[in-house]
Image (cartoon, rainbow, N blue to C red):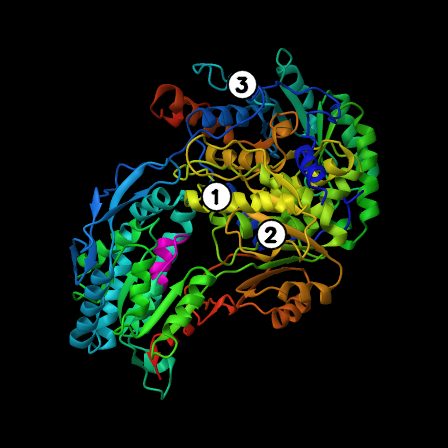
Amino acid sequence: MMHFSQLVSIDQLGIEERIARFNTRSIKKASKVQGLKLALSMIDLTTLEGKDTQGKVKQLCYKAQHIADDLNNLPTVAAICVYPNHVKTAKKSLMNSTIKVASVATAFPSGNSSLKIKLADTRMAVDHGADEVDMVISRGQFLEGNYRYVSDEISAIKEACGNARLKVILETGELSTLENVRKASEIAILAGADFIKTSTGKISPAATMPVTYVMLQTIRDYYDATGKMVGMKPAGGISTAKSALQYLVMLYETLGDAWMTNEWFRFGASSLANDIVMQLAKEEKGVYYSADYISKD
Amino acid sequence: MATTKQTTRTKTVSSEVKPGQKKTTKSTSSAAQKVSLTNNTWSYAAAPESTDHISIKEQYDLFINGKFVKPNSKKYFDTISPSTEKKISAIAEANEKDIDLAVKSAKAAYDNTWGKMPGKERAKYIYRIARLMQERAREFAVIESMDGGKPIRESRDIDIPLACNHFFYYAGWADKLEYAFPNRHPKPLGVAGQIIPWNFPLLMAAWKIAPALATGNTVVLKPAETTPLTALKLAEIIQESGLPDGVVNIVTGFGNAGAAIVNHPLVNKVAFTGSTPIGKYIQKAIAGTNKKATLELGGKAAHIIFDDAPIDQAVEGIVNGIFFNQGHVCCAGSRLFVQENIADLVIKKLKRRMETLIVGDPLDKNTDIGAINSKEQLEKIKYYLNLGQKEGAEMYQSNCALPSKGYFCKPTLFLHTSQSHRIVQEEIFGPVLAIQTFRTIEEVIEKANNIPYGLSAGVWTDKGSKIFNLTTKLRAGVVWANTYNKFDPTSPFGGYKESGFGREGGIHGLMGYVKI
């Protein structure tokens, strides 16, 4: 029975109540260390500024590999996320590591361009070696009700990605309702997304727990209907270790163990890594050390 | 009856295929760096609430006329923790003589001080009690969970704050009774005898005491024998608050003490929350007397899920409706009606959600379902679990591990039930949900009302007009729409039919304590 993709109604208050419940989970001791290390390994360390330069990208790549060399057994982040024109630099800088390079594409962040240009943008990123492509959906078309356009566009980009994994950014901050988030998630998944992602980070609000929860539920319903897994990436606005743990609790209780890996879950964030390192250092050394011990690249 | 066949079926019910175990599809590229989260499960480390800050005496006496006094019976009984089966304290057992003493001091306090005191003065005491409770909220929460078995998350976030809020709310009414009943000149009744259950010990005490004091009555309160501790702690606070002696008397004991309160000639009002059989006994006992009564009795609420409901949130509502407080809730949503076209989906989601419920130590902050209140209650629940299977319903329990000590019960569903099943008709008072399907709105209204109880109901639909249609037709005191088990001091609560009469909470809650 295919229950996926029937019109789903969503109760905002009910969602918020469930989130509040996730947030009462008390994550301490071994679970905390385990959770924080996992969260760190799930980070897509991001720089998406107009002022990005080769130098900046190189520094970030170095940081990704050596986030706190004085601490034991720290995982590295999952990926570096940059604009397409910096993929080459990032790829070269990360040559000797397992860290992936993700590139935004498709006229990021607005997505207001032709399919032709979006495809060219994507191909450039992939040709330069991007392992992952973070595309944006056409929110204008979505809000006009042209769902087929949105879907076809995603499928076309997916094809252009080749072996690179495709993350589809819904920009939930512009979709206004949770029902729209659900609908856009379904479109993205059915059109071939490997990951669905909340936000560009350029619009406020970016990732929120209610929005992420609705997306996780969509992924779960799709899995139920087809047996296929889809990944999730909340991006923007998650800057504290505590909040990362709350997201992990939500992930764990909604999708379960199988998704508790950076293969299926990512945090798009720039400052989160530092706070996690700070907390892990506290767990290892027993005291907090100064924020100045952690690099701010 | 195909009993054996049914039992086998029960055993073969297993959990769903877990994602990532069998049907996992391959990703197009491998992960950057796999961090194994141990071998499989991320379990939450124990996060127990500390018990260091609480003080429980080895022995508690009766709180009569502002003092703790030894019982005439000279007898004490143990109160134990249902999660460890260990004794916590010894509690005085009141007999008829003790009750007589308590009622007489309440009567004297009513005649001499409290009944004559202006409302604005009474309000000050009630506010003070509320604030003292609030200051010691954590202590109350821990003791409530130790003595009654409910998870600390609930006692901390629901029971204790709500109890405080009831005192705050009714303190506000004390000097405004003329506005609650304009031109009716409300007068207090006198001595209120109050008997409360073990499922929300402190909260029920607050529900009873706060409106009685606000309206100028004095009180003799008997907490349940399995959960007397928070009421006795409340007695300490009442002492501290300087409330005139005898205004509130708290007497612990068994059924005979309760009967002595009900039958005492100086008692003007009986307020009871508990089982329907005892409620019937009380009504017989006070027949022909001048005593007023409010009875809040059993329930077997219809919880109705329509196919246009927000399903994931409805599943949360179902969980909250039946597993809140281990299902020891008179208004628990224990009869689930799911529209047939979505039944499979709802049950699948419900089963999965049940797997994430953590059953165990009530003092652990991550516990969702704590201990069953007493051995006796656990036996009763087990009786119904057997009965349900004998009746041919399909039983499903979550795969959680239960602690080896203490009284625990797995969250349980009975599928394929009908109105004729006894597990559908009778109140189980445990984490046991009987699920039926329905087809049309007329059918579900008829079935929802086809029960001697009428305390509460729940409706889940995205359609506002459907909600109003149902709320007018369901014979239940409380109907929740797109939510369940929500309580507030400003909102009246009470039943239809054999679920009792009278309302507690809100402006309606004053009515049971005044002559107008």
- The residue that mark 1 highlights is B379
Amino acid type of the residue tagged 3 in the rendering = Pro
Q: Is residue A198 visible?
A: no
Amino acid type of the residue tagged 2 in the rendering = Ile
Q: Is residue B351 visible?
A: yes
Look at the numbered disc 2 and give the secondary structure of its residue: helix
Most foreground residue, B254 or A226:
B254
Look at the numbered disc 1 and give the secondary structure of its residue: helix
- The residue that mark 3 highlights is A75
Most foreground residue, B357 or B247:
B247
Whether labels 2 and 3 belong to a single chain: the reply is: no
Q: Mark 2, residues whose alpha carbon is within 10 Å: few (<14), some, or many (≥20)?
A: many
Q: Residue at x 24, y 43 (%)?
A: B56
**Residue B417 lies in the magenta stretch:** no
- Residue A196 % position (x, y): 69, 37
Q: CA distance from mark 2 to mark 1?
A: 15 Å
The chain to which mark 3 is attached is A
Residue range corresponding to the magenta coloring: B196-207
Q: Nearer the viewer, mark 1 or mark 3?
A: 1
Amino acid type of the residue tagged 1 in the rendering = Glu
Asked whether the beta carbons under mark 2 and mark 3 sit within 8 Å of each other, the answer is: no
